[in-house]
Image (cartoon, helix red, strand yellow):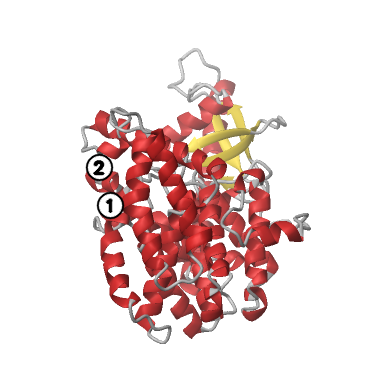
Amino acid sequence: MSAGGAIGLEPNRVYMTVDGRNDVLCALISSYYSVREVHDTVRTVANIPATPKVVVKLYTDAGVLLPIGPHLRPNSAIHPYRLVSSSVRDLGIPKPSETAQNLLESVKVVQTISDDVDDMKDNIAAVKFKVEQIERYSDLHTKEKSLAKPATRRVARVLQSMQLPIKLTTSTISKEVYEQMKLPTFDIWIFKEEELIDLMAHMFTEFGLISTFQINEQQLFTFLNVIKNTYNHNPFHNFQHCFCVTQMMYALLHVTSVHKKFTQIEKLSLIVAAIGHDLDHPGFNNAYQVNACTELATTYNDSSPLENHHAAVLFSILLHSESNIFSNVSASDYKEARKIIIQCILATDMAKHGEILSKFKGYAENFSYDDGNHRQALFQMLMKCSDISNEVRPKHISEPWVDNLLEEFFAQSDKEKLEGLPTAPFMDRDKVTKPSAQVGFIGFVMIPLFELASKVLPNMEEPIIHPIRKALEFYKNSLKPNN
């Protein structure tokens, strides 16, 4: 399930020291700024007056003079640029009273500035030559252009903000916890995010995926950390939700033993699809994206903009060698995995819910694991069940998620009202209560979905469907008489 908002270009962070002082300052420079606006921003941050009598120059830590403008490259606080200011005398037309010595000094200052300009031109020419060489002999030019795409741009920002390589640590999680993770009752709230990463990594190990596909441990943990950092801090669609969905996928595969019917590349695809199914979710759903004409809606032509974006972000992460856990997968396996992952993520668009259930219902009576269409439909059902599985869990684990989801829904509805956009009654804080929302969702969406899946998947009733029915009964009893 998904939601969204427009993604804009963020300003670059440029770190610098001023006139040899130790403190490091940060200026936010947008590529949309003019040269004058960049100069003004740098001077303001450095507390240098915007007067022609004070000249500022910017150098790299290696002493290379940099042009101060909108294309100034971002750097880090560890390697700040050096900003140097110097006073310049008023170079107006000499008054008759000026001495020949004063006039000579003014000419020298003008000559110094002229020399600096010549040096800057030489530096620009050298940089231009290097860039042209790089563009000619590598694919950097193509990658730079692709940063215009929302998914690639987002991943580039995340990687830029991270310190790589990721430092590997020894897991302190017990074997008992790993075994509990195979059950739908697993409690995620007691673990830190770093521990959730260790738990997800274990899923790859336990299914034998690391050995089968020669997944490098450094790449796996880099991949999972990039994933964590690419999820936004929404009330509901966040990294903890990513883990919940992935863990439920893992539990369903074990509880039903259906993983024994699947190939290794299929198991890898299902786990990765669950991990990436809501990447970079902005907290506002597809209806908002389309009605607000956001960048995502424009990019994907109003067709499942969020789900298309989630998949694109996932595969953008896999484009980078540091986080490409498919680097040793054969071309044919990768093609199969990509197809499964994309179709599973797109299946989480609730606008396609009826269509997917109708198709699977047609397959369920005479389901065959030998039929490729049947298998793909089952993968989508597993993904959908995992995505909306909170009520399978005990109430003390599931109920906080209801509050989080309503908080996200209410925030979207409030925003839509302010912007004069259409609103949905089930997201309106003035029209919905927790019990009424849950009774409708569990009764009309969850139970039909899980019961249909149980026509093919064994052992679903007691561990999976029974807790959902108990949750429905609980929320029905919580309804006030006038509801």
Residue at far top of view = 97
Up-down: is 120 above or below 265? above
Residue lying at 47% horizontally and 62% vertically, measured from the top left = 461
x, y percent for residue 476: 38, 39
Number of residues whose C-alpha sits closer than 10 Å to that of mark 1, classed few (under 14), some (14–19) or many (20 or more): many
Residue occupying the point 50% across, 40% down: 399
Res 297 label: 1
Marks 1 and 2, how far apart in space?
Answer: 8 Å
What amino acid is found at the position of numbered circle 2 in the picture? Ala
Q: Secondary structure beneath disc 1?
A: helix
Closer to us: 372 or 225: 372
Which residue type does callout 1 highlight?
A: Ala
Query: Do residues under tags 1 and 2 come within 8 Å of each other at their CB atoms?
Result: yes
Give the side of residue 218 with respect to residue 369, left or right: right
Instruction: Give the residue pinned by disc 2.
Output: 292
- Residue 340 seen in the current view: yes
Residue 315, horizontal then vertical, whole percent: 46, 65
Q: Residue furthest bottom?
A: 370
How many neighbours does mark 2 have within 10 angstroms: few (below 14), some (14-19), or many (20 or more)? some
Name the quadrant of the C terminus: top left
> Residue 240 appears at what percent x and percent y?
55, 48
Circle 2 SS class:
loop
Q: How far from the left and from the top, in percent, is residue 45?
A: 55, 27
